[in-house]
Amino acid sequence: MEGVTDWPARLWFGQTSAPEFMWTPFLRVTDTFPGRELPRFWCPELARGVLPAAKSGVIPQLMVTNADDFARVAEQVLTTGGHEWVDLNCGCPSPVVVGGRAGSALLQHPEELGEMLRAVTGRLGPGRVSVKVRTGFAAASEFPAILDVLGELPLRQVAVHGRTRPDRYLGRARYDLVEMAARRLDGIPVIGSGDICDFATAEVARQQTPGVSKWIIGRGALRNPWIFEELRSGNPVTIPLETILGAIECFAWLHELYWNDGERLVRLWGDGVFEASAGLDPDRWRRLLDQVAVRGAVPGRRACSRTKMIWNYFRRFCYPCIFSINRKIHSR
Ligand SMILES: Cc1cc2nc3c(=O)[nH]c(=O)nc-3n(C[C@H](O)[C@H](O)[C@H](O)COP(=O)(O)O)c2cc1C
């Protein structure tokens, strides 16, 4: 998620409840950017293939407007550490992005999108490209034509956010359309996205979309960063207050290091500090904090403002009953 799942946040989610995969925020590609080297801290995991904490995988996502730029940068991503595939953002609704003919704008002309993907998959090989789409640029009636084009391509997977661009993030995600994608895209795994925020909502999605293999948790993971544990165990997690406080402080320090002392973060990472998840254990969070915090200092303004963003998601949904984050709270 743009502005959210940068490298320190991915390390942090590895510590809270380690999802199976995490997407990078999209990397906006132009004809000159990135140059010969990928931005160092956009996706350091590429050098290793997996995140250390509980072995979450990472999916590098690009935002492009044409096949040449896409193929050029995708080749860099695939050769740096031998990552298996690259994801294309066809979902971002932002007016700036759409004005630049990227993100969800690519859905406006499915044939042109198909041509671009055909050229790139032809160059990179089958299974080397995945896409993340919405259910239409202007309206959901466009979706069948988009699926017809995607179904002809050798894609690794297709992730479907069950909303159109005008929907942005409002209203209910259309699970019937996510299921339609799973039925029409024969042989291409479909990942669903939209509105999962706890075990109960995940069950609803599962029941309504039997053809869908996996789901992306977006805002639900900001509201409850331990959600992946909840989904694995099938039980609402109870988060001790000390864990919440330690985790929030760690979040701030990870960002402080990322922006102001990236080399130290790389060293800690190399030393295996993030190897095991801290989960719900306050002692583990305290130990992690001892390793990432600078004694006698406080995180700077930028790190604090990013921390405030995640805290605001978190607080709004969890504060009324901070010790027990459960279905009832999430369904409010
Ligand atoms: C702040 C924010 C940033 C996002 N950034 C991206 C992005 O960079 N790439 C992408 O494919 N989707 C992005 N999304 C969309 C989410 O991946 C997801 O599809 C959407 O939020 C619906 O799922 P949810 O209801 O679980 O949040 C973003 C969503 C939000 C709220």
Image (spheres, helix red, strand yellow):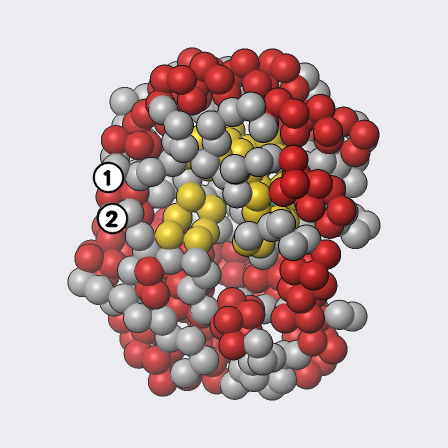
Indicate the position of residue 301 as horizontal and vertical percent values: 48, 56
Indicate the position of residue 239 as horizontal and vertical percent values: 54, 82
Q: Is residue 265 left or right of residue 66?
A: left
The amino acid marked with disc number 1 is Gly
Gap between marks 1 and 2 measured at Cα: 6 Å
- Residue at image location 36% in from the left, 85% down from the top: 283
| Residue topped by disc 1 | 81
Q: Taking 183 as reference, is 90 above or below it? A: above
**In this rendering, does residue 317 appear at all?**
no
Q: Taking 101 as reference, is 17 above or below it? A: below
Relative to the observer, which residue lies in front, 121 or 31?
A: 121
In the rendered image, the quadrant that contains the C terminus is: bottom right
Relative to the observer, which residue lies in front, 175 or 89?
A: 175
Quick one: SS at disc 1?
A: loop
The amino acid marked with disc number 2 is Arg
Ligand 1 has an atom within 8 Å of the beta carbon of the residue at disc 1 = no
Res 313 → quadrant: bottom right
Bin the neighbour count of mark 1 within 10 Å (Cα to Cα): few under 14, some 14-19, many 20 and up.
some
Q: Taking 85 as reference, is 49 above or below it? A: below
Quick one: SS at disc 2?
A: loop
Kindly check if marks 1 and 2 are in contact, taking CB atoms under 8 A apart as contact: yes
- Residue at image location 31% in from the left, 52% down from the top: 50
| Residue topped by disc 2 | 48
